[in-house]
Image: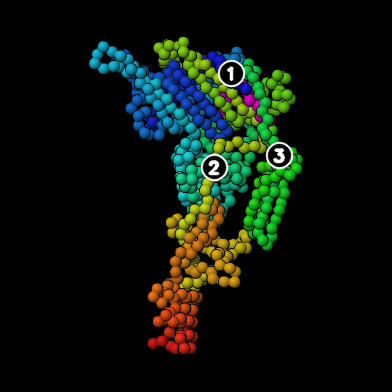
Amino acid sequence: MMERTFDERLTVLLTLTIGGKSHKIVAGSIKRFALDLWSWGLEGEVEFLLTDNQARGGKEKDALLADFLKPDLVEVSLEVKAVLAEASSRPSYTSLKVKGFVSDKTLVEEVIPTKGASDVILHRRYGIRFQDSARLLWRQHYPCALYTSKTVQDVLDAHKGDKISLTYDWSAGLGTTHSMLFVGLDPEAQASFYDWVLWYVHGHGGVFTYDYAKQGYKFAGAKDASGTPLELEKDNLAGLEMLFPEIIRHDMTVLNATAESPQTQPVAQKQAVAGIRQDVLLCTSISDEVQARVDLETARLKWRGPEMELVWRSFPEKAFTPGALVKLPPNEAWGAAGVAKDQVLRVRELHLSGEVLEEQGSEEVYNDPDALFSFSMSTRLEPKDEPHVDLPAWQPPAYPRYVEGFIVSEQGADKDETWQAYTDSKTSLDGYKVKIPLFADQIIPAPFNPNLLPGHFYFPAYKGERVLVGLDFQRAWIKRFLDWRTGARMPQDGQGVQLLVGKTPENGTAIKHFYTDDKPVLLMQRTSAKDTQKIQLDEGTLLIQVKEEK
């Protein structure tokens, strides 16, 4: 449905705060404004004109210019309020208030030719574009950070800074303590922390909303359905269009590809077309992870209900923002074919724009708190119980990232190159512990498995061994081994190779093969402090020796 443009007198107040100093611009100075408000955030733009005529003997001074030219972060507050009542004889107006931060600015100086040597600047036309704080700041935020024994809420709190306010009502999604969480964002991959947040919310069936009243963000497990719905007045409305989103026509199947216990769990829904499905492939030995994914896909596999697009012909006396509950007028014309009759709806989007009428002279309205705008406004509504969660476009973060670490073992003395398998109390699975020096020596788990060796070689990684570790969001694994064990490397001239086993070179066994005078030599030697036993095969010689070294 096309938006309807109408003339509307509005009170508009723009406040710019730069370096702690506030600049107020009233409606008489504003030439154009637009707001796009969603359930998850906002963006807007304003153009305004400031007079600077003191050079020509006038009284108007542009106090904004010096601060506007600074690179400081600019906080924006925009307030819009109706002036003329449409629906009541004794109106009680409330304002639409939004806040954000400037993303980019423009400035045009209007020069007046004079007879003198230089022209005079009479007006400056300023332009700003702004967004909600998280969308502006988190999209420039690419942290690479490791957390152990923390919750996702702890991670969010660590990155909110002093400009982003967060609240939580999602203990199942954010309150669980994890052995490791890795936020490894690469600017070249172009998935920012904002993308990471949306990726997590979508992947765990959460709700991410912007609270316009508190100017902050809320993470929840379900949409908020509390509050008394606002009765919309028919005198403010111009038209209604019903929208029917595409219906999901596929089933889901969750596959677990572990060799010992493979699983195939279908997730069906009645609107699916036979033979059309989407498969999710897992490979995990933890059955709870499979069930959690089945539950998530079951919750996702619900089609969206009808939505309503409202077009307005006047700005409402009682302003509202996305997230508000409303009811359409009770007469049949606004029943939306019976779908919306007596139904409580939720505002999901709100779009409005105003441009000053050209026939108004700037002198006539320059200092007035209200002005006549060519105005348009539309609203997207959804049923209060609609499960679909609207989110902005996002891209998934790029995993894995790789870091170096040292194998941890608590067996034996500090110098002993022992190995140790740690059993997870929740999953009963064995794992290594790996210390990551880059991230404050935090210790993370990794699978205790043969890695790149076939299973008949049992050579666990030893204490202090330097390894390359692959890091995903919630798991890590040993990618490869990076150094030789102490004493393992042999002289190049003899082209020797050897196998070292045991705790230390002074308390272990070595099997060596090397060349002397281009003749192969095989040596097996056991060492325990000064006590040595060896078997050596040379050209024409077999030596078996038991000896106590001096």
In this view, the mark in front (1 or 3): 3
- What's the amino acid at mark 3? Arg
Q: In the rendered image, which quarter is residue 415 located in?
A: bottom left
Q: Residue 272: percent from the left, percent from the top?
A: 73, 40
**Which residue: 66% across, 28% down?**
243
Q: Is residue 528 visible?
A: no
Q: Is residue 306 visible?
A: yes
Give the magenta-colored segment's residue range.
306-321
Give yes or no for residue 309 being in the magenta stretch: yes
Q: Residue at 37%, 28% (x, y): give it.
A: 68
Q: Earlier in the sequence, mark 1 or mark 2?
A: 1
Residue drawn 65% across the image and 18% down it? 234
Q: Is 242 positioned to the left or the right of 119 in the image?
A: right
| Dot 1 crowding, Cα within 10 Å, few <14, some 14–19, many 20+ | some
Label 2 crowd bin: few (<14), some (14–19), many (20+), radius 10 Å = some
Q: Is residue 14 magenta?
A: no
* Residue type beneath disc 2: Gln
| Horizontal and vertical percent position of residue 87 | 61, 16
- Is mark 1 in CB contact (under 8 Å) with mark 2? no
- Residue closer to the observer: 480 or 327: 480
Question: Which label belongs to residue 395?
Answer: 2
Q: Nearer the viewer, mark 1 or mark 2?
A: 2
Q: Position of residue 475 (x, y in %)?
A: 55, 56
Alpha carbon of mark 1 to alpha carbon of mark 3: how far?
35 Å
Between residue 110 and residue 324, name the one nearer to us.
110
Q: Are marks 2 and 3 in contact (CB under 8 Å)?
A: no
Q: Please state which of residues 488 and 491 is positioned toward the viewer in this rendering.
A: 491
Q: Which residue is mark 3?
A: 249
